[in-house]
Image (cartoon, rainbow, N blue to C red):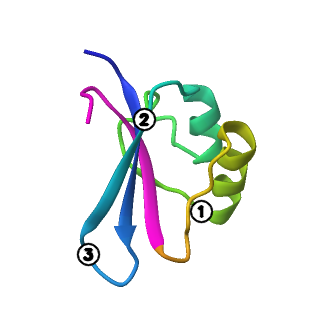
Amino acid sequence: MGIYLVVSLFQRDGDGLTNMLQLEESDLQFFRETLNVPEEDPLLYGEYQINPEANEKIYQRYGFKLDLDKYDCFAGYKTDKL
């Protein structure tokens, strides 16, 4: 069992989960700072919305950009693989 960062994508014009992306390699501190995670959640087990500024930082660091016009995207660490 490992801990993985999971990005959940929800269709903006609907309520349903569209897709989930799992990052095998991620930097907890980078995501805590990028997503403005409160101190009460030091391991980022909550889900935090990815805004345009965070999306750009993730793109610069990891090389992918999410379509925030089409999806509401959230990130958080999970203990099980997808």
Q: Residue 15 carries which label?
A: 3
Q: How far apart are marks 1 and 3 (CA)?
A: 18 Å
Residue sitting nearer the eye, 38 or 67? 67
Query: In the rendered view, does 59 fall on the left or right side of 29?
Result: right
Q: Is mark 1 on a helix, strand or loop?
A: loop
Residue at left offset 45%, top offset 70%: 71
Q: What x and y, as percent, mark residue 7?
A: 42, 48
* Badge 2 density bin: few <14, some 14–19, many ≥20, Cα 10 Å: few
Does residue 74 belong to the magenta stretch? yes
Mark 2 sits on what residue?
41
For residue 47, above or below residue 79: below
In which quadrant will I find the N terminus?
top left
Mark 1 sits on what residue?
51
Q: Is mark 3 on a helix, strand or loop?
A: loop
Q: What element carries label 2?
A: loop
Residue at left offset 27%, top offset 29%: 81
- The rendered magenta stretch, by its main secondary structure, is classed as strand
Residue at left offset 56%, top offset 59%: 66
